[in-house]
Amino acid sequence: MKKYFLHNGTDSIGPFDKKELKQLGIVKTTPVWVEGKERWTCAENYEDLHELFFNTPPPITPHQKPKNRIWMKKAFKWFFGFFVIGCISAVGIVTYYEVSIEEGKLMHLEQKQEAEQQTRNTITTLVVANTNEYTSNGLGGISNLDITVSNKTNYIIDEVMVEVEYIKKNGGIFNVEKLVMKNINPNDTKSIRAPDSNRGRTVRVSIKSIYSKQLNLCYDNNMPIIPGNPDPFICNN
């Protein structure tokens, strides 16, 4: 039985018989040498090895596709194209809408913060204390004294401390009372009765402190204002 040698690109291997060559799956261009040949040659040059090669089937002649199938394919492509464009447009519209909402929220927040800061900086003109027509005795003494605090802001004022000075005829201060009023609604007023005094001809009222959580306001009449601070009455904690 004839024996064949193969070349793997570096060394020769074998010998093999035809059955072993078939198992190895040789092709027409596989280098093969048999005893008696002067040189290596392709396997296709050995007629006895032709049966080992797989024959390539003839090409199939393409049939013309029906026109309706071509039309349906084009229609699908157009539909898919419009669908993709529609999705991209929808994503763009949603993104633009979301960005616009975020920009609107940011602008609203900035406007809200500016309004709050302006209110804090002018708080002494927006939250004021006044007295009623109290009774002043001829020999000295104050009675029926009501203190009214007006909240002219759009925010709830949680607490206001008012200082009441009872002034004697000679201008000296006879007594000082501190009154606290809580929870004054926006654009509203609240009153409190001040203690009577057996001396004094007039009274002088002043606001010593104002606190509003909603406005983030911590005003203190005794707190020094740092020069250049654009928002001196904002709460720091």
Image (cartoon, rainbow, N blue to C red):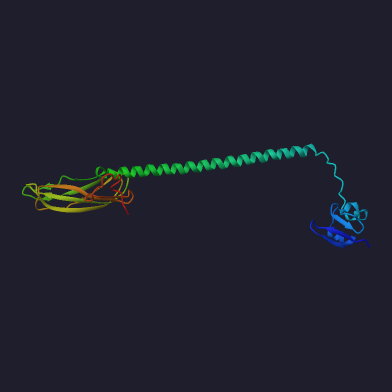
Q: Quadrant of residue 32?
A: bottom right
- Residue drawn at (32%, 44%) of the image: 117
- Label total for image: 0
Q: Position of residue 166 (x, y in %)?
A: 12, 50
Q: Which one is in front, 110 or 136?
A: 110
Q: Is residue 13 left or right of residue 170?
A: right
- Could you tell me which quadrant the N terminus lies in? bottom right
Q: Which one is in front, 165 or 97?
A: 97
Q: Position of residue 55 (x, y in %)?
A: 88, 51
Residue 237, relative to residue 87: is it above or below? below
- Residue drawn at (71%, 38%) of the image: 75
- Residue drawn at (59%, 41%) of the image: 88
Question: Can residue 187 be seen in the rendering of this structure?
Answer: no
Residue 24, relative to residue 201: is it above or below? below
- Could you tell me which quadrant the C terminus lies in? bottom left
The extreme left residue here reads 139
Q: Position of residue 227 (x, y in %)?
A: 26, 45
Question: Can residue 94 be seen in the rendering of this structure?
Answer: yes
Q: Position of residue 76 (x, y in %)?
A: 70, 40
The extreme front residue here reads 38
Q: Is residue 44 left or right of residue 236?
A: right
Q: Which one is in front, 58 or 208?
A: 58
Q: Is residue 205 left or right of residue 88?
A: left
Q: Is residue 188 left or right of residue 50?
A: left
Q: Which one is in front, 77 or 135?
A: 77
